[in-house]
Amino acid sequence: MNAEEFKLFEATLKEKLPVTFRLNAGEHNIDKVSSVLRDPNFINKFTDETITIEPDEHASLKTTKIDYSSLRMDCKAFYPGNVLFEMMIPRELLKKNIGLKQIH
């Protein structure tokens, strides 16, 4: 591996992974939960775009501005039963951001 390829490899390793989770197929109402998560309007229903978030001096995740229009919950079709989901946002941001509080 040459130096350029290694730099690309190293940068890729440092990228934040998306939130990925699987519903437990043995739980009650799994079909209902899965259909709520697959709803195309899921993000709009469970985020609060109207919150005015003032950036703080520490640039914390709690006040990070999020582009809700590009955010979505994806059901991974390759996994059987519609129980595997992915959201293209780092886990830390999902846990701490004020606008995403209802999802977490």
Image (cartoon, rainbow, N blue to C red):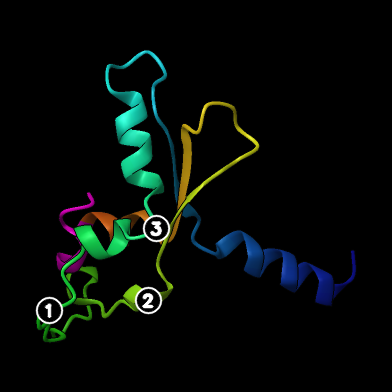
Mark-to-mark CA distance, 1 and 2:
13 Å
Q: Nearer the viewer, residue 51 or 89?
A: 51
Judged left or right of residue 4, residue 38 is left
Q: Mark 1 and mark 3 in contact? Answer it, CB < 8 Å.
A: no
* Residue type, label 2: Ser
Q: Nearer the viewer, mark 1 or mark 3?
A: 3
Callout 2 secondary element: helix
* Image-quadrant location for residue 54: bottom left
Dividing the picture into quadrants, the one containing residue 56 is bottom left
Query: Mark 3 or 2 closer to N-term?
Result: 3
User: Which residue is rendered at x = 67% and y = 65% of the image?
Assistant: 10
Q: Is residue 56 left or right of residue 4?
A: left
Q: Residue 69's mark?
A: 2
> In whole angstroms, how far apart are the C-alphas of marks 1 and 3?
20 Å
Residue labelled with disc 1: 50
Badge 3 element: loop
Disc 3 residue type (three-letter): Pro
Residue segment shown in magenta = 96-104
97 horizontally vs 7: left or right:
left
Check if mark 1's residue and mark 2's residue have beta carbons within 8 Å: no
The residue drawn where x is 23% and y is 81% is: 59
> Which mark is drawn over residue 40?
3
In this picture, is 7 found above or below 43? below
Above or below, comparing residue 95 to residue 71 in the picture: above
